[in-house]
Amino acid sequence: MYIDTHAHILDEVYGTPEAVIARLGEEGIDRIVNVGYDLPSSVGTAALCERHSCVYGLVGIHPEHADTVSSEALCRLASLATKKGVIGIGEIGLDYHYTPFDKEQQKQAFLQQLELAYSLKKPFCIHLRDAAGDMNELLTKNRELLRYGGVMHCYAQSAELVPFYLKLGLYISFTGAVTFKNARGLLDAVRAVPADRLLTETDCPYLTPEPYRGKTNFPFYVKYVAKRLAELKEMPEEAFCAQVKENARALFHVEF
Ligand code: NI
């Protein structure tokens, strides 16, 4: 009944991704979306989708690896994006958290990959950290490129900014951070998103929800994210999960 729309199960912490996939069914997880963050992990994601029908994939280059976005890399991504089970471009975006970073290089890498998503008529997944000003300006200036939809993943912006992203037609996805004790501002953001624009994710192996905070995260723990979000949206959990599934289908154009 649950779906994890943003996981990184190729991470070495899991040994093999198959060890995680083998447990999905028994844990009540229907589908997961595995997300690439550089070229090797994007190649790995496409291979994973080929082998497992319960895994969809996104291919893309994370802003931390913006220096690797070349025309060859974009060609590779374009070809990976047509493979079985690959449903969009991601994760792409801006991240000014860890220094040093090159703002212009990140902006260019992000735009080039947004253009790629647009040219392929595929949705995209945005990673945004400590760079909302530049991101919002880029999105506003390039509205046409958002035509095939996208998601603000691991939402960590204010509730005040939610209407801006909604107006751009974007979905908003929350992680286990909504279960943390100090999540107050984030909970206001959840309340500001209509149920038909919400997605659930783990971003595993990071951001492990309560009651497992501090341990390795797994796609199964998306149930704790869903439970908390359903509570906040004052919806029965089952109805909430059905809505999320419908949202994911509407964005990615595949059955979840
Ligand atoms: Ni991620």
Image (cartoon, helix red, strand yellow):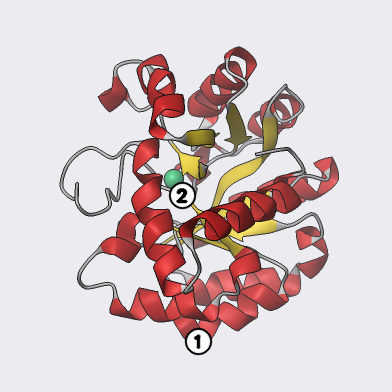
**Mark 2 lies on residue:** 201
Residue 112 showing in the rendered view: no
Residue 214 showing in the rendered view: yes
Compared across the picture, whether 219 is left or right of 142 comes to: left
Q: Earlier in the sequence, mark 1 or mark 2?
A: 1
Q: Would you place residue 67 above or below residue 98 in this image?
A: above
Q: Would you place residue 81 above or below residue 16 in this image?
A: below
At label 2, the amino acid type is Glu
Label 2 crowding class (10 Å Cα cut-off): few <14, some 14-19, many 20+? many
In the image, which disc is placed on residue 160?
A: 1
Q: Dividing the picture into quarters, in which one does residue 215 lie?
A: top left
Q: Position of residue 17 (x, y in %)?
A: 40, 20
**Please, what secondary structure does the residue beneath circle 2 have?**
loop
Looking at this view, name the residue that lies furthest to the left. Answer: 214
Compared across the picture, whether 240 is left or right of 247 comes to: left
In space, the residues marked 1 and 2 are separated at their CA atoms by 22 Å
Q: Position of residue 228 (x, y in %)?
A: 37, 63
Using the image as rendered, state which of residue 75 and residue 232 is in the foreground: 232
Label 1 crowding class (10 Å Cα cut-off): few <14, some 14-19, many 20+? few
Q: Residue at x 29, y 17 (%)?
A: 15
Looking at this view, name the residue that lies furthest to the top. Answer: 51
At label 1, the amino acid type is Glu
Using the image as rendered, state which of residue 8 and residue 202 is in the foreground: 202
Quarter of the render that holds ligand 1:
top left
Using the image as rendered, state which of residue 79 and residue 220 is in the foreground: 220
